[in-house]
Amino acid sequence: MSETLVFLLSVLVLVLTGGVAALAYALLGRPRPDAGDGRLGELARLQAETAGRLQAMGEALTGRQAELARVLSERLDSVSSRLGASLETNTQQTVDRLQHLHERLAVIDNAQKNLSELSSNVTSLRDVLANKQSRGAFGQARMEAIVQDGLPKSFYEFQYTLTNHTRPDCVVFLPDKRPLAIDAKFPLEALTALRDAGTEEERKAAAQRIRQDVAKHVSDIAGKYLIPGETQELALMFVPSESIYAELHDGFDDVVQKAYRARVVIVSPSLLMLAIQVMQQILKDARMREAADQIHAEVGRMMNDLGRLRDRVLKLQQHFSQTSEDVRQILISSDKIEKRAAQIEAVEFDADSAAKENANVIPAPIQHRLEAGE
Protein backbone atom coordinates (compact mmCIF):
# COMPACT_ATOMS: atom_id res chain seq x y z
CA MET A 1 0.00 0.00 0.00
CA SER A 2 2.95 2.43 0.79
CA GLU A 3 4.60 1.67 -2.55
CA THR A 4 1.41 2.58 -4.34
CA LEU A 5 1.23 5.88 -2.52
CA VAL A 6 4.89 6.67 -3.40
CA PHE A 7 4.19 5.91 -7.05
CA LEU A 8 1.15 8.16 -7.00
CA LEU A 9 3.18 10.97 -5.38
CA SER A 10 5.88 10.67 -8.06
CA VAL A 11 3.33 10.85 -10.82
CA LEU A 12 1.71 13.83 -9.14
CA VAL A 13 5.12 15.61 -8.86
CA LEU A 14 5.83 15.06 -12.57
CA VAL A 15 2.42 16.34 -13.56
CA LEU A 16 2.78 19.41 -11.38
CA THR A 17 6.30 20.09 -12.72
CA GLY A 18 5.08 19.87 -16.30
CA GLY A 19 2.14 22.11 -15.46
CA VAL A 20 4.41 24.71 -13.84
CA ALA A 21 6.74 24.69 -16.85
CA ALA A 22 3.82 25.08 -19.22
CA LEU A 23 2.45 27.90 -17.11
CA ALA A 24 5.80 29.67 -17.05
CA TYR A 25 6.15 29.35 -20.74
CA ALA A 26 2.69 30.73 -21.26
CA LEU A 27 3.34 33.64 -18.97
CA LEU A 28 6.74 34.61 -20.25
CA GLY A 29 6.09 33.90 -23.94
CA ARG A 30 8.98 33.19 -26.23
CA PRO A 31 12.43 33.70 -24.72
CA ARG A 32 14.37 36.77 -25.67
CA PRO A 33 18.12 37.12 -25.47
CA ASP A 34 18.07 40.18 -23.25
CA ALA A 35 15.64 38.80 -20.66
CA GLY A 36 17.05 35.25 -20.34
CA ASP A 37 18.53 35.69 -16.86
CA GLY A 38 15.36 37.18 -15.39
CA ARG A 39 13.20 34.42 -16.78
CA LEU A 40 15.53 31.74 -15.59
CA GLY A 41 15.44 33.25 -12.14
CA GLU A 42 11.66 33.43 -12.22
CA LEU A 43 11.54 29.84 -13.40
CA ALA A 44 13.88 28.75 -10.63
CA ARG A 45 11.73 30.56 -8.12
CA LEU A 46 8.59 28.90 -9.40
CA GLN A 47 10.32 25.55 -9.40
CA ALA A 48 11.45 26.08 -5.80
CA GLU A 49 7.92 27.04 -4.73
CA THR A 50 6.54 24.02 -6.55
CA ALA A 51 9.07 21.76 -4.86
CA GLY A 52 8.13 23.23 -1.44
CA ARG A 53 4.47 22.76 -2.07
CA LEU A 54 5.11 19.24 -3.28
CA GLN A 55 7.11 18.50 -0.14
CA ALA A 56 4.34 19.95 2.03
CA MET A 57 1.79 17.90 0.14
CA GLY A 58 3.98 14.81 0.55
CA GLU A 59 4.23 15.39 4.30
CA ALA A 60 0.47 15.98 4.52
CA LEU A 61 -0.15 12.81 2.48
CA THR A 62 2.22 10.89 4.77
CA GLY A 63 0.34 12.11 7.87
CA ARG A 64 -2.99 11.31 6.26
CA GLN A 65 -1.64 7.88 5.32
CA ALA A 66 -0.60 7.23 8.96
CA GLU A 67 -3.97 8.45 10.24
CA LEU A 68 -5.76 6.34 7.64
CA ALA A 69 -3.71 3.29 8.63
CA ARG A 70 -4.56 3.87 12.33
CA VAL A 71 -8.27 4.32 11.63
CA LEU A 72 -8.28 1.27 9.38
CA SER A 73 -6.49 -0.75 12.07
CA GLU A 74 -8.99 0.34 14.74
CA ARG A 75 -11.90 -0.36 12.45
CA LEU A 76 -10.49 -3.75 11.55
CA ASP A 77 -9.97 -4.57 15.26
CA SER A 78 -13.53 -3.49 16.07
CA VAL A 79 -14.95 -5.44 13.14
CA SER A 80 -12.86 -8.47 14.10
CA SER A 81 -14.07 -8.25 17.72
CA ARG A 82 -17.71 -7.90 16.72
CA LEU A 83 -17.33 -10.62 14.14
CA GLY A 84 -15.73 -12.92 16.72
CA ALA A 85 -18.47 -12.22 19.27
CA SER A 86 -21.14 -12.70 16.62
CA LEU A 87 -19.56 -15.94 15.49
CA GLU A 88 -19.33 -17.15 19.11
CA THR A 89 -22.97 -16.21 19.75
CA ASN A 90 -24.11 -17.85 16.53
CA THR A 91 -22.07 -20.92 17.36
CA GLN A 92 -23.64 -21.18 20.84
CA GLN A 93 -27.11 -20.63 19.40
CA THR A 94 -26.43 -23.23 16.76
CA VAL A 95 -25.26 -25.69 19.43
CA ASP A 96 -28.35 -24.98 21.56
CA ARG A 97 -30.64 -25.38 18.60
CA LEU A 98 -28.95 -28.58 17.57
CA GLN A 99 -29.31 -29.89 21.14
CA HIS A 100 -32.98 -28.87 21.23
CA LEU A 101 -33.43 -30.43 17.83
CA HIS A 102 -31.78 -33.60 19.11
CA GLU A 103 -34.17 -33.65 22.07
CA ARG A 104 -37.14 -33.10 19.81
CA LEU A 105 -35.92 -35.85 17.54
CA ALA A 106 -35.66 -38.14 20.56
CA VAL A 107 -39.24 -37.26 21.51
CA ILE A 108 -40.36 -37.83 17.95
CA ASP A 109 -38.50 -41.13 17.95
CA ASN A 110 -40.31 -42.20 21.13
CA ALA A 111 -43.61 -41.05 19.68
CA GLN A 112 -42.85 -43.01 16.53
CA LYS A 113 -42.16 -46.08 18.65
CA ASN A 114 -45.40 -45.56 20.56
CA LEU A 115 -47.26 -45.14 17.30
CA SER A 116 -45.68 -48.32 16.00
CA GLU A 117 -46.70 -50.18 19.16
CA LEU A 118 -50.18 -48.67 18.98
CA SER A 119 -50.43 -49.64 15.33
CA SER A 120 -49.42 -53.19 16.15
CA ASN A 121 -51.94 -53.24 19.02
CA VAL A 122 -54.66 -51.90 16.74
CA THR A 123 -53.75 -54.51 14.17
CA SER A 124 -53.88 -57.26 16.77
CA LEU A 125 -57.19 -55.89 18.10
CA ARG A 126 -58.54 -55.82 14.56
CA ASP A 127 -57.44 -59.42 14.13
CA VAL A 128 -59.14 -60.32 17.39
CA LEU A 129 -62.36 -58.55 16.46
CA ALA A 130 -62.36 -60.14 13.04
CA ASN A 131 -62.93 -63.54 14.68
CA LYS A 132 -66.47 -64.08 16.04
CA GLN A 133 -65.33 -66.23 18.96
CA SER A 134 -62.59 -63.79 19.94
CA ARG A 135 -65.02 -60.91 19.57
CA GLY A 136 -67.54 -62.68 21.81
CA ALA A 137 -64.86 -63.41 24.41
CA PHE A 138 -63.84 -59.73 24.35
CA GLY A 139 -67.41 -58.56 24.96
CA GLN A 140 -67.97 -61.12 27.72
CA ALA A 141 -64.71 -60.18 29.46
CA ARG A 142 -65.68 -56.51 29.47
CA MET A 143 -69.13 -57.32 30.83
CA GLU A 144 -67.66 -59.53 33.57
CA ALA A 145 -65.30 -56.75 34.63
CA ILE A 146 -68.19 -54.28 34.99
CA VAL A 147 -70.34 -56.74 36.98
CA GLN A 148 -67.49 -57.80 39.27
CA ASP A 149 -66.63 -54.18 40.05
CA GLY A 150 -70.22 -53.28 40.98
CA LEU A 151 -71.77 -56.25 42.81
CA PRO A 152 -70.85 -58.63 45.64
CA LYS A 153 -69.90 -62.09 44.47
CA SER A 154 -72.97 -63.76 45.99
CA PHE A 155 -75.38 -61.69 43.89
CA TYR A 156 -74.28 -62.77 40.40
CA GLU A 157 -73.06 -65.82 38.54
CA PHE A 158 -71.47 -66.30 35.13
CA GLN A 159 -72.65 -69.04 32.77
CA TYR A 160 -75.62 -69.84 35.02
CA THR A 161 -77.72 -72.79 33.78
CA LEU A 162 -81.46 -72.18 33.54
CA THR A 163 -84.16 -74.84 33.63
CA ASN A 164 -84.30 -74.91 29.82
CA HIS A 165 -80.58 -75.84 29.83
CA THR A 166 -79.51 -72.51 28.37
CA ARG A 167 -76.67 -70.50 29.86
CA PRO A 168 -76.59 -66.72 29.56
CA ASP A 169 -73.26 -64.98 29.94
CA CYS A 170 -74.28 -63.58 33.34
CA VAL A 171 -77.25 -63.49 35.69
CA VAL A 172 -77.90 -61.13 38.60
CA PHE A 173 -80.01 -62.41 41.48
CA LEU A 174 -82.52 -59.74 42.48
CA PRO A 175 -84.45 -59.70 45.81
CA ASP A 176 -87.27 -61.92 44.49
CA LYS A 177 -84.61 -64.58 43.71
CA ARG A 178 -85.43 -64.48 39.99
CA PRO A 179 -82.25 -63.95 37.94
CA LEU A 180 -81.84 -61.11 35.47
CA ALA A 181 -80.09 -62.40 32.34
CA ILE A 182 -77.32 -60.39 30.69
CA ASP A 183 -75.88 -61.55 27.35
CA ALA A 184 -73.04 -59.89 25.39
CA LYS A 185 -73.42 -59.40 21.62
CA PHE A 186 -71.05 -57.63 19.23
CA PRO A 187 -72.62 -56.90 15.79
CA LEU A 188 -69.41 -55.53 14.31
CA GLU A 189 -69.29 -57.05 10.81
CA ALA A 190 -72.50 -55.45 9.56
CA LEU A 191 -71.59 -52.02 10.99
CA THR A 192 -68.12 -52.28 9.43
CA ALA A 193 -69.73 -53.06 6.10
CA LEU A 194 -72.00 -50.02 6.53
CA ARG A 195 -69.01 -47.78 7.23
CA ASP A 196 -67.07 -49.12 4.27
CA ALA A 197 -70.02 -48.90 1.87
CA GLY A 198 -69.26 -46.71 -1.12
CA THR A 199 -72.59 -46.72 -2.95
CA GLU A 200 -76.19 -46.34 -1.92
CA GLU A 201 -76.93 -49.97 -2.73
CA GLU A 202 -74.11 -51.15 -0.50
CA ARG A 203 -75.33 -48.94 2.36
CA LYS A 204 -78.86 -50.29 2.04
CA ALA A 205 -77.60 -53.86 2.00
CA ALA A 206 -75.39 -53.23 5.06
CA ALA A 207 -78.28 -51.55 6.93
CA GLN A 208 -80.55 -54.48 6.18
CA ARG A 209 -77.90 -56.86 7.44
CA ILE A 210 -77.59 -54.86 10.68
CA ARG A 211 -81.34 -55.07 11.23
CA GLN A 212 -81.30 -58.80 10.61
CA ASP A 213 -78.32 -59.46 12.90
CA VAL A 214 -79.65 -57.36 15.79
CA ALA A 215 -83.15 -58.81 15.39
CA LYS A 216 -81.67 -62.32 15.54
CA HIS A 217 -79.71 -61.52 18.69
CA VAL A 218 -82.80 -60.03 20.33
CA SER A 219 -84.90 -63.03 19.34
CA ASP A 220 -82.32 -65.46 20.72
CA ILE A 221 -82.11 -63.63 24.05
CA ALA A 222 -85.91 -63.35 24.40
CA GLY A 223 -86.47 -66.99 23.46
CA LYS A 224 -83.74 -68.48 25.65
CA TYR A 225 -83.44 -66.28 28.73
CA LEU A 226 -87.00 -65.00 29.37
CA ILE A 227 -88.72 -67.86 31.22
CA PRO A 228 -92.02 -66.94 32.94
CA GLY A 229 -91.90 -67.49 36.67
CA GLU A 230 -88.18 -68.27 36.68
CA THR A 231 -86.37 -65.22 35.30
CA GLN A 232 -87.10 -61.53 35.32
CA GLU A 233 -89.53 -60.13 32.77
CA LEU A 234 -86.76 -58.46 30.80
CA ALA A 235 -83.16 -59.18 29.83
CA LEU A 236 -80.15 -57.05 28.94
CA MET A 237 -78.26 -57.23 25.66
CA PHE A 238 -74.77 -55.86 26.28
CA VAL A 239 -72.99 -54.15 23.37
CA PRO A 240 -69.31 -53.65 24.42
CA SER A 241 -68.76 -50.56 22.27
CA GLU A 242 -70.12 -47.07 22.87
CA SER A 243 -69.75 -46.13 19.20
CA ILE A 244 -71.71 -49.17 17.98
CA TYR A 245 -74.40 -48.52 20.58
CA ALA A 246 -74.62 -44.87 19.45
CA GLU A 247 -74.89 -45.89 15.78
CA LEU A 248 -77.67 -48.34 16.62
CA HIS A 249 -79.67 -45.67 18.48
CA ASP A 250 -79.02 -42.94 15.92
CA GLY A 251 -79.58 -44.87 12.71
CA PHE A 252 -81.67 -47.88 13.69
CA ASP A 253 -84.26 -46.66 16.16
CA ASP A 254 -86.79 -49.17 14.79
CA VAL A 255 -84.52 -52.04 15.81
CA VAL A 256 -84.16 -50.61 19.33
CA GLN A 257 -87.95 -50.22 19.66
CA LYS A 258 -88.51 -53.81 18.53
CA ALA A 259 -86.02 -54.94 21.16
CA TYR A 260 -87.96 -53.01 23.84
CA ARG A 261 -91.19 -54.61 22.75
CA ALA A 262 -89.49 -58.00 22.99
CA ARG A 263 -88.48 -57.05 26.60
CA VAL A 264 -84.80 -56.93 25.70
CA VAL A 265 -82.93 -53.75 26.65
CA ILE A 266 -79.80 -52.91 24.64
CA VAL A 267 -77.14 -51.38 26.91
CA SER A 268 -73.65 -49.97 26.37
CA PRO A 269 -70.80 -50.21 28.91
CA SER A 270 -71.80 -46.94 30.59
CA LEU A 271 -75.48 -47.92 30.77
CA LEU A 272 -74.56 -51.34 32.15
CA MET A 273 -72.53 -49.63 34.90
CA LEU A 274 -75.57 -47.49 35.73
CA ALA A 275 -77.87 -50.53 35.76
CA ILE A 276 -75.46 -52.40 38.05
CA GLN A 277 -75.44 -49.46 40.49
CA VAL A 278 -79.26 -49.42 40.51
CA MET A 279 -79.31 -53.17 41.17
CA GLN A 280 -76.84 -52.72 43.99
CA GLN A 281 -79.11 -50.15 45.64
CA ILE A 282 -82.15 -52.41 45.18
CA LEU A 283 -80.32 -55.32 46.82
CA LYS A 284 -79.24 -53.08 49.68
CA ASP A 285 -82.82 -51.90 50.27
CA ALA A 286 -84.03 -55.52 50.18
CA ARG A 287 -81.50 -56.52 52.82
CA MET A 288 -82.66 -53.61 54.96
CA ARG A 289 -86.31 -54.73 54.62
CA GLU A 290 -85.39 -58.32 55.49
CA ALA A 291 -83.61 -57.12 58.60
CA ALA A 292 -86.45 -54.80 59.67
CA ASP A 293 -88.09 -57.39 62.02
CA GLN A 294 -84.77 -58.23 63.57
CA ILE A 295 -84.05 -54.55 64.02
CA HIS A 296 -87.49 -54.07 65.64
CA ALA A 297 -86.87 -56.96 68.09
CA GLU A 298 -83.45 -55.61 68.95
CA VAL A 299 -84.93 -52.18 69.60
CA GLY A 300 -87.55 -53.75 71.93
CA ARG A 301 -84.89 -55.59 73.89
CA MET A 302 -82.88 -52.44 74.08
CA MET A 303 -85.93 -50.59 75.51
CA ASN A 304 -86.37 -53.32 78.16
CA ASP A 305 -82.73 -52.99 79.10
CA LEU A 306 -83.21 -49.25 79.34
CA GLY A 307 -86.20 -49.75 81.69
CA ARG A 308 -84.20 -52.06 83.94
CA LEU A 309 -81.39 -49.56 83.96
CA ARG A 310 -83.83 -46.83 85.04
CA ASP A 311 -85.15 -48.98 87.93
CA ARG A 312 -81.65 -49.71 89.12
CA VAL A 313 -80.75 -46.03 88.96
CA LEU A 314 -83.83 -45.19 91.05
CA LYS A 315 -82.88 -47.83 93.62
CA LEU A 316 -79.38 -46.46 93.70
CA GLN A 317 -80.82 -42.99 94.23
CA GLN A 318 -82.83 -44.27 97.23
CA HIS A 319 -79.69 -45.82 98.67
CA PHE A 320 -77.91 -42.52 98.17
CA SER A 321 -80.77 -40.69 99.92
CA GLN A 322 -80.69 -43.13 102.88
CA THR A 323 -76.95 -42.85 103.09
CA SER A 324 -77.24 -39.06 103.08
CA GLU A 325 -79.72 -39.21 105.96
CA ASP A 326 -77.45 -41.54 107.91
CA VAL A 327 -74.55 -39.18 107.36
CA ARG A 328 -76.68 -36.27 108.58
CA GLN A 329 -77.59 -38.19 111.78
CA ILE A 330 -73.95 -39.08 112.29
CA LEU A 331 -72.99 -35.40 111.97
CA ILE A 332 -75.65 -34.47 114.55
CA SER A 333 -74.30 -37.09 116.97
CA SER A 334 -70.79 -35.83 116.33
CA ASP A 335 -71.84 -32.28 117.17
CA LYS A 336 -73.42 -33.46 120.42
CA ILE A 337 -70.33 -35.42 121.37
CA GLU A 338 -68.20 -32.39 120.58
CA LYS A 339 -70.35 -30.18 122.83
CA ARG A 340 -70.18 -32.69 125.69
CA ALA A 341 -66.44 -32.92 125.29
CA ALA A 342 -66.20 -29.15 125.51
CA GLN A 343 -68.25 -29.14 128.71
CA ILE A 344 -66.09 -31.89 130.21
CA GLU A 345 -62.96 -29.98 129.27
CA ALA A 346 -64.38 -26.85 131.01
CA VAL A 347 -65.09 -28.79 134.19
CA GLU A 348 -61.61 -30.24 134.33
CA PHE A 349 -60.17 -26.78 133.85
CA ASP A 350 -62.13 -25.44 136.85
CA ALA A 351 -60.99 -28.34 139.09
CA ASP A 352 -57.35 -27.68 138.22
CA SER A 353 -57.70 -24.00 139.21
CA ALA A 354 -59.18 -24.87 142.64
CA ALA A 355 -56.36 -27.29 143.30
CA LYS A 356 -53.80 -24.62 142.59
CA GLU A 357 -55.50 -22.17 144.99
CA ASN A 358 -55.53 -24.72 147.88
CA ALA A 359 -51.95 -25.74 147.37
CA ASN A 360 -50.66 -23.26 150.06
CA VAL A 361 -53.20 -24.29 152.76
CA ILE A 362 -51.97 -26.78 155.42
CA PRO A 363 -54.44 -29.59 155.41
CA ALA A 364 -56.02 -30.51 158.73
CA PRO A 365 -55.43 -33.96 160.03
CA ILE A 366 -58.10 -36.32 158.90
CA GLN A 367 -59.57 -38.42 161.56
CA HIS A 368 -60.23 -41.93 160.60
CA ARG A 369 -63.68 -43.03 161.21
CA LEU A 370 -64.83 -46.53 161.02
CA GLU A 371 -67.73 -46.98 158.73
CA ALA A 372 -70.40 -49.43 159.43
CA GLY A 373 -69.23 -52.84 158.69
CA GLU A 374 -65.49 -52.02 158.87
Image (cartoon, rainbow, N blue to C red):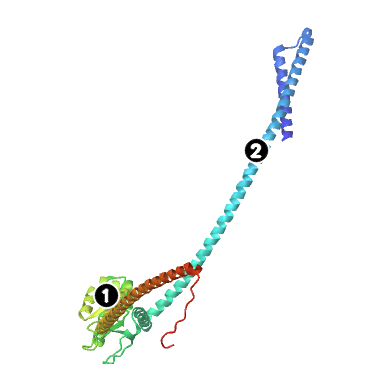
Residue tagged by mark 2?
75
Give the image location of residue 217, x and y in percent.
27, 82
Instruction: Say which mark, if any, is on residue 140.
Output: none
Question: Who is closer to the viewer here, 51 or 308?
Answer: 308
- Label 2 and label 1: CA atoms lie apart by 84 Å
At 66% from the left and 40% from the top, the residue drawn is: 76
Above or below for 30 versus 137: above
The answer to whether the residues at label 2 and label 1 have Cβ atoms under 8 Å apart is no
Choose between 43 and 270: the one closer to the eye: 270
Which numbered disc, 2 or 1, marks the residue closer to the eye?
A: 2
Say whether residue 236 is visible.
Answer: no
Label 2 sits on what residue type? Arg
Q: In this rendered view, identify the residue nearer to me: 321 or 151.
A: 321
Q: Is residue 361 left or right of residue 148?
A: right
How many labels were placed on the picture? 2
**Tag 2: Cα neighbours inside 10 Å, few (<14), some, or many (≥20)?**
few
Give the x, y percent position of residue 304.
Answer: 26, 83
Judging by the rendered image, the residue that carries numbered circle 1 is 207
- Residue 233: give x, y in percent of width and height: 22, 83
Q: As shown in the figure, which amino acid type bears the numbered disc 1?
A: Ala
Above or below: residue 25 compared with residue 207: above
Frontmost residue, 226 versus 333: 333
User: In the figure, residue 234 lies in which quadrant?
Assistant: bottom left
Q: Quadrant of the N terminus?
A: top right
Quadrant in the rendering for residue 21: top right
Q: Which quadrant is home to the C terminus?
A: bottom left
Left or right: where 368 falls relative to 316:
right
Give the image location of residue 69, x and y in percent. Answer: 69, 34
Q: Which residue is situated farthest in the top direction here?
A: 34
Check disc 2 and report its element: helix, strand or loop. helix
